[in-house]
Amino acid sequence: RGPTTLQLDQRMQQQQQEIQNIRQQQQQEMHDVPTTKFQVINERHEQIEQILEQRNQALERQILSEEMPHNRIPTSGQPCVYEASEEEVALKNLAKDVYVHFTLLIDYISYGINYLISLILNNFFGYPEPSKVHIATPTFHPAVLITGASVGVGKDVALNLARKGYTVFAAVNKVEDFQSLLGQFKSFKNENNGTLRCIVMDMANRKAMQKTYHTIRHDIGRDIPFVGLINVATTVIYLPLEVASDAAIHDSFETNLFGVIYLTKLFLPLLRESRGRVINVGSISSLSSASSMAIYAASKAALKALTRTWRQEVRSMGVNMVLIEPGFSTSSPYHENLQHVSPRTLETYDTQFKIVGKLFDEVVDAANPPGIVTDAIVHALTSKFPKSTYYVGMDSKSLALLNWLLGERISDAIQAKIFGF
């Protein structure tokens, strides 16, 4: 196991004592010898000093390496960078796997409870009515449109449904994103004969949305039903309201709300024909937001209200609208959003920027994997009795519960304690 820290400290003290003794000896020699030999002794003294300094540094590095065996001990002038061992990486991955499986277990328990309650209510009161289910098979390939398929949750959902046998229209920002997506899809076994098709579309471009609608309608014809619109595309803006430009606010609402409204209106006729579903991906921030999240949280809160109200309007037509509210899964880099802030205003919010930016960086590093959200979306698309709202991830469930139990005032006080302002 090597020497203990106490033993290493004792060795360090011994080295320091040796250095002190040698220095005293050299000083005595310098007083005892003639002046003509002073230069020679001085050179010898410098050489010994260098040797002792090297021994001192080597011992310090040994202490560091034995106390923290997985550090890369730097040479002179280099920063010390921590490198996790294979055991630590494996342990971290194991913790993530346990978290994912535990979260999915909680989700499946809630799905089962929701199904039983819905079934009982349907048998006794005739409500809720079961939704029509379109399950893909090797010979049946219903179509879905997924926005925001370039990265993150949207990309994961597109791959998952295509592997299950669906005809997936993946809306991406640019063709290069789809090429990457298609490359991943081809690496899987396509046992259910699903397909992945590219749609280049901007949620702020109405003409692009119209083109998407006509393209999909032409491609599927009458043989393939269009059964699902999955709105994943999101613009994340983390800025205090005072420093946020009108353009930033408009861009966020254009993607997160207005684009969803316009696209859903385009595809509702096809969804009525198939008795399909609209799945909107919101955020738990609509219920419990934090500093600098006002723009993002407001757009998601509006999407939440929109989904709940629209669901009531189209329910009798056989169209089901579902809201997915994940915790932190993916997010835009916080610091990139400060480039247009004036120096004077930036100075005013300097403390908040630093604290919030650091906290968000840490949260993003520990964010939920996309697969958890994908699992909820697949259930919402294929279940006979889908839930109206899915709180995805333990952070989302916890925040929803705490907000319900404690109320906004106490939640705000807790956040103030965490953020420090």
Image (spheres, helix red, strand yellow):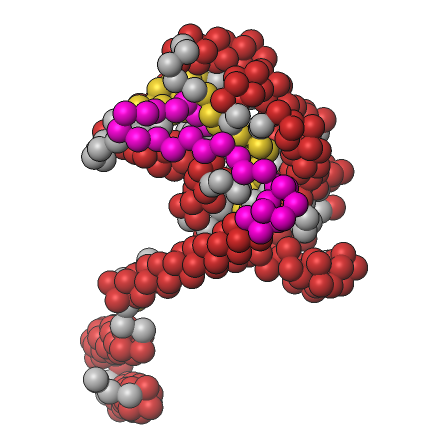
Number of marks in the rendered image: 0
- Residue at image position (40%, 56%) is 100
Q: Indicate yes or no whether the magenta region holds residue 141.
A: yes
Task: Find residue 96 and report its horizontal and vertical position in percent.
Answer: 38, 59
Q: Identify which residue, 369 or 414, lies in the foreground.
A: 369
Q: Is residue 397 left or right of residue 227?
A: right
Q: Is residue 130 visible?
A: yes
Q: Quadrant of residue 382?
A: top left
- Residue at image position (64%, 55%) is 400
Q: Identify which residue, 301 or 275, lies in the foreground.
A: 275
Q: Bounds of the magenta span? A: 118-147
Q: Indicate yes or no whether the magenta region holds residue 283.
A: no
Above or below for 186 versus 36: above
Q: Identify which residue, 271 or 182, lies in the foreground.
A: 271
Q: Quadrant of the N terminus?
A: bottom left
Above or below for 188 versus 263: below
Task: Find residue 191 and report its horizontal and vertical position in percent.
Answer: 22, 33
Above or below for 80 versus 168: below
- Residue at image position (52%, 18%) is 273
